[in-house]
Image (tube, rainbow, N blue to C red):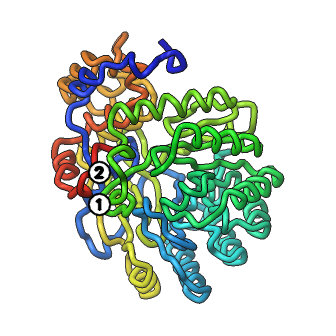
Amino acid sequence: MTTSQVQLADFDFEKIGVALGETPRVAYAAAHAYPASAPAYVEKVCAERDRPAGDALRLYVHVPYCNYRCSFCFFAVRVGAQRDEMQRYVRALRRELEWADAGTPLSQMFMGGGTPTALPPDLLDELLGSIFQRLPSQGDNLHVVEASPESLTAEHVAVLKRQGIGRISMGTQSLEEEVLGEVRRRHTAQQTLDACRLVVDSDLLLNIDLMYGLPGQTHESFRRDFQTIADQGVQSLTAYDLRLNEQTPVARSLSDADRLELARLVEWRLFVRRTAAELGFSQTRWHTYKRLDTVAARHKRAPHHDSSGRGFQLGIGMSARSHLGTTVYRNHERSPTYIERIESSRSPVEHVIELREDDRKTQYVASTLGDGQPLDAGDYNRVFGNSIDADFGEPLERLLRGGLLAEAENVYRLTETGRLLYDRVTFNFYPPRVLNWLAARKPVMGMGLTT
């Protein structure tokens, strides 16, 4: 039975709940984005980052500036910064970039935040120019810059085109004024439509972020939003559910009816998939829907670690994460401290996670099953030197018995039900100590299970 045919009444949620087991009650990232989804960092002030073996780097650049702070946001952002501070921050980013040897090939650059287009166009131009001058692009992966509807201007778009950016990812979340107000979004639906037209007319690839499960949102309003966005000629769309943790103010205002318990989560995901298909979008990853007859079909996210979990991603900026070798480093999350360390020639790193073998095994599962790909048990054995049954026999058996996984010829795949609950399936392969860390996070009072 395909997703388009299945109905909510077809699910045995009691059986599914038993198969899934205990689910963490807080979320810091999608479950397959391990270990960002469970950021159990250890303080290691000014730790020096190791240089990984290999030729190319993937780069993440954190620009923290925003015009406002959404109530669902738990990222490191700065609201109300003036130009002088921004200039100083851009200089710090350029200096931190010197960690990478000049001429190192760049497989992909992703600039997020925050809102990179909150920077004045000339500062954005200066930053991008410095990046590509030091790290020449390798291959045909598209470089990505995030934007917001109220901050994006024609001058920003001209800078992005000139610097070779291939894709703009714009956070919109909703076009309903009431829903936007509930989560403190301070842009209008018309600003979103104007920004869409600006980017589409420039021939840059545009991705729009929509959220489901927002306070006051209905299936009908989400479909209207999707339809309106599709009508603008947008080539790809990211749709993801509201994530809650102890740092998100929106969690304290949600009613019980607004919380994404198991049945309601499945209902929403079925609806989103059907809506996307009806409007001509194909699901290519859990959150991503593309028009495959457009340039969006060739955009892929470059990997930042190999199958054994050894990474080659550099992150620059406050709170930015680097995954280099078997260590994840996170920079200091406050702008003044980050800048001061860079200016005084000290490492900006504040915390680390040393990835143990069980972490790297979790990453393997997260980047296969957790990302919608088959898991070849033979390949797992070749990478880690032992069988996946020896490491994960109990959750595999439980998920197979519950109809969330299927196995044939030593290859595991998610079933249609499993695909709808990919994140909760993935949690079953987290190390017990990490699950205990997540369980110990203080959930917001009254908060139900979330993704």
Quadrant assignment for the C terminus? top left
Q: To which quarter of the image does residue 246 belong?
A: bottom left
Residue 105 is at least partly visible in this image: no
Q: Nearer the viewer, residue 153 or 215?
A: 215
Residue beneath label 1, please? 246
Amino acid type, callout 2: Val
Q: Earlier in the sequence, mark 1 or mark 2?
A: 2
Q: Is residue 415 above or below residue 48?
A: above
Q: Decide: few, some or many residues near mark 1? Use Cα within 10 Å; few <14, some 14-19, many ≥20.
A: some
Q: Nearer the viewer, residue 381 or 283?
A: 283
Q: Is residue 203 above or below residue 188?
A: above
Please name the residue shown 60% across and 36% down the image. Answer: 289
Residue 170 is situated, as x and y percent measured from the top left of the image, at 63, 55
Q: CA distance from mark 1 to mark 2?
A: 7 Å
Please name the residue shown 78% across and 50% down the image. Answer: 200
- Residue 218 located left or right of residue 402: right
Q: Secondary structure at mark 1?
A: loop
Q: Is residue 176 above or below residue 23?
A: below
Q: Secondary structure at mark 2?
A: loop
Residue 429 is situated, as x and y percent measured from the top left of the image, at 26, 35
Residue beneath label 2, please? 26
Does the CB distance between marks 1 and 2 fall below 8 Å?
Answer: yes
Residue 46 is situated, as x and y percent measured from the top left of the image, at 32, 75
Q: Nearer the viewer, residue 241 or 288?
A: 241
**Farthest residue toward the right?**
201
Residue 28 is situated, as x and y percent measured from the top left of the image, at 35, 54
Residue 84 is at least partly visible in this image: yes
Please name the residue shown 68% across and 77% down the image. Answer: 120
Amino acid type, callout 1: Glu
